[in-house]
Each structure stands twice: as C-alpha cells, then as structure tokens.
Image (cartoon, rainbow, N blue to C red):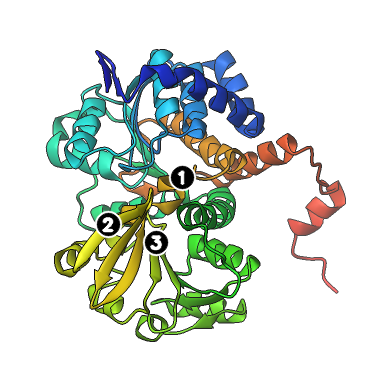
Amino acid sequence: MDTGKTYEVKNLSFASQGKNNMELAELNMGALLEVRKRFEKEKPLKGIRVGLALHVTKETGVLVRTLIAGGADVAITGCNPLSTQDDVAAALADEGVKIWAYKGETTEDYYRYITNVIETKPNITIDDGCDLVSEIHKNHPDLISNIICGCEETTTGIIRLKAMEADNALKYPMIAVNDNKTKHLVDNYYGTGQSTVDGILRATNLLYAGKTFVVCGYGSCGKGVAQRAKGLGANVIVTEVNSFRALQAVYDGFRVMKMDDAVKIGDVFCTVTGGKHAVSLDMMKKMRHGAILANSGHFDIELDLKSLNEVAGAHKQVRPFMAEYTLDGKKLFVLGEGRLINLAAGEGHPSEVMSTSFCGQALSCEYGVKNKGKMPTKVIQLPEKIDDEIADLQLTAMGIEIDQLTAEQEEYLNSWEEGT
C-alpha cells in the first residue's frame, strides 16, 4: 500500500495506466466534457469543498477532474469494497487529489477512508449508497451546518434517504440524482443491464443460451438485466413484490413467479432489489446443484451470505470472483462475494453511460451552490429543465439533431380553445 498525507492507494506505479484509461473514457464522455468546458470558464464551484464516496472508476476520475475544473476542492473514497480500479486511484493521487481507496478494502479501512473524507469538512457530499451521508449524520453532526446539500447516485441510497426523511433524521437537502430521467434510462436500464451480464460472464465464462436466469426485482435495473440476459438466449424469470412491476414484466414477455417456485428451476440468480435477503438461506437450500448467485444491488445483504457461511459444509475460491459452497451436499456458487458483480468482476458501466449520470452529479453541485439556503431539507429532484439539458448534451455528443416546435405548434399546445 502506498500512503501519503492526502492519499492511500494500492500502488502509485499504476498511475500511468490509470491516466491512459481515463483518457480513453473521456473519448466517450463528450457530454460531461462539455460541462467541464463551461465549468473551466465560469468556476461555479470555486471555494467549495466536495466530498465523494463513489465507485473509483475511470469514469469517476473524469467527474473528479470536471469538479476540480469548476473550482472545487475534492476528496474522494470508494463506496464499495470491491469496486475501486487501483490504477485510477493511483492516477488521481498522482494528480494531487485527496483519495483513499483500493480494491478489496477491509470494513475497517472502508469506514476509516469515509472518515478521512468527512474530516475535509465538505460543503457538498456526493454519495453512492448513502454511507457518507449516514456517517455524517450519526457521527459528525457538527459539520452539517456548513453543508449546502448532498447528491445521491443510486436507488439504494435514495431508499435510505427517504427513510431518513420519514424519520425526521435528514438534516440537509439531498438531490436525488438517481431519479433523473436520464439516469434511470441510461445508467440504471442500459448500464446495469449490460455491465451486470458482463460481470457474470467474466466471473464464470457462462453460456447464457438455454440457462434459466432469475432476476429478483424489476425496477429500472432489473428490467435492463432481464432484457440483456434474454438477448443472450437465457430463459428469464422475474420475481417481484410490487404488483405493477410484476405486471409489466409479464407484458414484457417474462415468466413471473414467487421465489419459492423460481429457486427450484433457476440456474443463475441475480438480485437487483435494493433490499435485504432477496435470496434467503431457505431459498438457497431449495436450489439446484450448481446454481449461481450474483448481486447487482448496491449492498451484499441482498444475498443472505452470513447465514450461508455459518452453515455451509465447505467454501473455496474456484475462480477469482467465484466461490464454491457446499450446502446439504449440493454445490452453490457465489460471485464477487455477493457485492456488485458488474464492478467486482467487471469494469462497471461503459463510459458513455456514466457521462450522462455524472453530468447529473456535476450540474447538481452547481444547482446546490446557486440555490444555497433555498432548498428544503428533504430528498429533492433536479428541475426537469436541467434533466433535459443532460439529454441535449448527450444527443449533441452523439451527433444527433432533433426537431423544434414551430410558433404555431407552441401556441396550439399552450391553448385550450382550438379543438376538433
């Protein structure tokens, strides 16, 4: 481990490769680079300390550079023990960024690093999963008076934040970047779908065709995973607790059933619920010999691995991100320690996907500064105008032009008198 006053990373010699990867990422992040160009001129974040707990990937590195270009003083750590790309962490440390992160962090290091970020006294927090916000509220409430707002990246974090709001525990405004239309469409649906299927493939070298693939949860992320698994030839089953989502899954052409029934016929199980124990020990006991378990929700508690570890007869690593358990004489395989498989075994979302998501983060920071003291202390969304701006930036980056309404069409849409 290489350690300095403002960093702790696995190996600083990885910095050159990390910079190469960030350079490649920028080729596919044109929308975010347009935000960076404007930030460089206007410096909307001048004098603002931004603390981040995000997956430290090449795309996140591009976001960090964008925030710095806007005048921000940035400190960052990871938001999941297995998601850091060590070459990118080294590159950011080499560029002078305050960073504490490495792939395979212990729980102790994970929270120590979050504390390091908190000790920089951020004015804005950027979170993926709500651990940074939670730690500030529980253990550093004295810092809250100087925090303008926070920005949350993922569904799991929004669930936790809304629970905080309901308990009157939330003490500063949180912008739900995850709830942007552009985030749900590009990141959750297309990004999670592709990267999850890719992560499982890298971990197992599995042939999807002909397999029975069970997707637990049919939110935006689950929809993407189901569609991509289907595209590779898998027979997809969806399990849900929400009637509307279950109905949509049926109309999308998938079999929908209870987990108690799915566990008896599934070959691969992937959880994307944002909840706890979507796959319980009792369910595991009913699975077929050779079943594969993966998680693409933010926290590993979607799989009840604690109970599995307590009762399994044996446990060994058979591939870098594939562990074999023996349970009641059957072999079960757990991928990526039950953590986000798309980042544990893969590289996460493609750069083009994260460009739109991180436009949301950068513009949320700017929005927070512009509206300091005016935002309610609750979970809020960016104005639709800003979300549409992100879509415009991405279309421009893709070289796509769209039509505009004529004056006559505008007048018609804004009136009520003209009818049949």
Distance from the alpha carbon under mark 3 to that under mark 1 = 26 Å
Q: Which mark is residue 229?
A: none
In the picture, measured across the screen, residue 378 lies left or right of residue 37, that is: left
**Residue 182 position (above or below residue 47):** below
Instruction: Count neighbours of disc 3 (C-alpha within 10 A) and say few if under 14, some if 14 to 19, many if 20 or more.
Output: many
Specify which label sits upstream in the sequence, 3 or 1. 1
**Residue 414 position (above or below residue 214):** above
3 or 2: mark nearer the eye: 2
Q: Nearer the viewer, residue 228 or 368?
A: 228
**Residue 50 position (above or below residue 255):** above
Q: In the image, residue 4 lies at what x, y percent? A: 26, 14
State the residue position of label 3. Answer: 294
Q: Secondary structure at mark 1?
A: helix
Q: In the image, residue 275 lies at what x, y percent? A: 31, 64
Q: Nearer the viewer, residue 317 or 382?
A: 317
State the residue position of label 1. Answer: 177
Which residue is rendered at x = 79% and y = 41% of the image? 400
State the residue position of label 2. Answer: 316
Distance from the alpha carbon under mark 3 to that under mark 2 = 16 Å
Kind of residue at disc 3: Ala
The answer to which quarter of the image holds residue 276 is: bottom left
3 or 1: mark nearer the eye: 3
Kind of residue at disc 2: Lys
Q: Are marks 3 and 1 in contact (CB under 8 Å)?
A: no
The answer to which quarter of the image holds residue 171 is: top left
Q: Nearer the viewer, residue 12 or 65?
A: 12
